[in-house]
Amino acid sequence: MVGYEKKIFYAVNNNYTNLIINTGCWGRTELSDLGLVTATGIDLEPDGNIRITVISITPTGFGAKGEPEKSNSWIGTATGKTLADAKNNLNETATKNLAWFHNRFIIIGENFAKHGIGDIIDHLSRGRQFRYENKVLITPTTAYDMLTIPADVEKNLVLEIEGIVNSMKEEWSKVYVENFKNILVNYCEKKSGFITGRIHYFKNENTTISTSRGDFNEAGSGERQQYVAAIKGSGVFMDEKLIGWIDGDETQAYMLIKGKARNGVITSRYNDGKDSLSYVFKRSKSKMKAEFDGNKISFNIDIKMTGRIEVLYTEQNILKEEEINKMEEAVSETVKHNLEKLIKKAQEEFEVDFLGFGEYIFRRHPKRWKEIGDRWDEIFPYIEVKYNAQAKIDNSGIISKLVIN
């Protein structure tokens, strides 16, 4: 057996190091000669060239059962006139054969995103090694700077980014990270717009201890070890170009409208601003309905949530039904305020329908869409949007009379 008939099937788990090995070899490439790329960053240089930056791993130590126990991480970067050219130029410094089958994240610098990511979409969609499940993140700095900060807690930066994305998706709902497949579909169908997550880093003044950071300090790193990766908010695209940003609250409002918010935290003021609370919703439902009156188009958005009070600062008797109603009303008003901010930004600042109103008409009212579809970008900023939010505090009977002063 030769070539691809003799293979190593390997499955990389969250550690990117546990491989399941069968007999044979992958063509003529030994496993130890492969660099498994796990994150790819793309930037536009001031001279017009394209910079690609990658993080790859190579297993170096194996246990008794033949499974790798250690791995080396390598950060490589190169430039070129095209993305393909830059990618090939990585071979000038790479000591391993780079493979993108297990790439998890595509991080794009702001300058490139504003210029337009059409070339990235075209190149990656043609590549045999890039999977459509890749998550796409936009950074307000450069992808190179983002990928060269050290991991703070996990073994490498890719695991750290993946952990943040998963925890925020399940518990916070203030970041929405789109996959490459959906961005490709949006690009091909020429929809009005889309969003995807914003990744950045900030200086951490507090002292943290972790294996990866300890190793980084031993290597001698200057000041950059004080920076940590963070994900919050989203970048807004029209067609292929980044046109602006929305913050975490606005991203949560987007996810509520789209029915994508599984869980989340909403902090509100109530009792004439004297008290505050944090509300954790565990269920949310969203309904959208379009109404047509001649040439006038309006939308009604109805959002219902069920959750609990997580933190409460008040001197009121929270066992009273009246007080519970006040808290529910306070949370509902906060959600409506965030919806208003988001819709106003979409209509007045961006003038881009990344919220999916046009898609709703296209699917639910195809005859009407045939009449207005060609003019939707002009119509969208002037449609009327009405919204209602209802937050329900579940299990209110078990709330104890605990007051935090």
Image: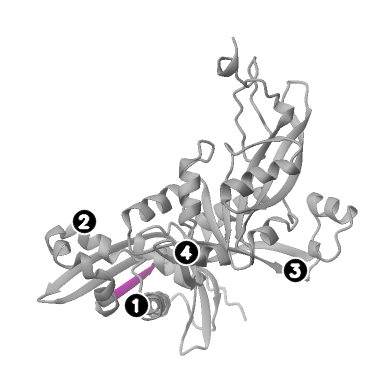
Residue at mark 4 to residue at mark 3: CA–CA distance:
39 Å
In primary-sequence order, the first of circles 4 and 3 is 3
Q: Residue at x 37, y 61 (%)?
A: 284
User: In the image, is residue 389 part of the stretch drawn in magenta?
Assistant: yes
**Contact (Cβ within 8 Å) of mark 3 with mark 1:** no
Name the image quarter holding the N terminus.
top right
Q: Which part of the image, by quadrant, shows the C terminus?
A: bottom right
Front label number (1 vs 4): 1
* C-alpha separation, residue under disc 3 versus residue under disc 2: 47 Å
Please give the residue where the numbered disc 1 appears in the rendered image. Answer: 347
Say the numbered circle drawn on residue 398: 4
Type of amino acid at the residue the image marks with label 4:
Ile
Q: Position of residue 73 (x, y in %)?
A: 75, 43
Mark 1–mark 4 distance (CA, rounded to whole Å) = 43 Å
Q: Is residue 393 visible to the viewer in this orientation of the structure?
A: no
Q: Give the spatial CA distance, label 2 vs label 4.
A: 44 Å
Q: Amino acid at mark 3?
A: Asn
- Mark closest to the chain's N terminus, 2 or 1: 1
Q: CA distance from mark 2 to mark 1?
A: 21 Å
Dot 3 or dot 1: first in sequence order is 3
Task: Name above or below for residue 17 compared with residue 151.
Answer: above
Q: Which residue is mark 3?
A: 204
Give the mark, 1 or 4, whose residue is nearer the N terminus.
1
Estimate how packed mark 2 is, as few (under 14), some (14 to 19) or many (20 or more) residues with alpha carbons within 10 Å. few
Q: Amino acid at mark 1?
A: Gln
Instruction: Tell whether position 297 is magenta.
Output: no
| Residue 207 coordinates in the image, percent (x, y) | 81, 65
> Does 131 appear above or below 210?
above
x 73%, y 53%: residue:
153
Is the C-beta separation of discs 4 and 3 under 8 Å? no
Q: Which residue carries the number 2 mark?
A: 363
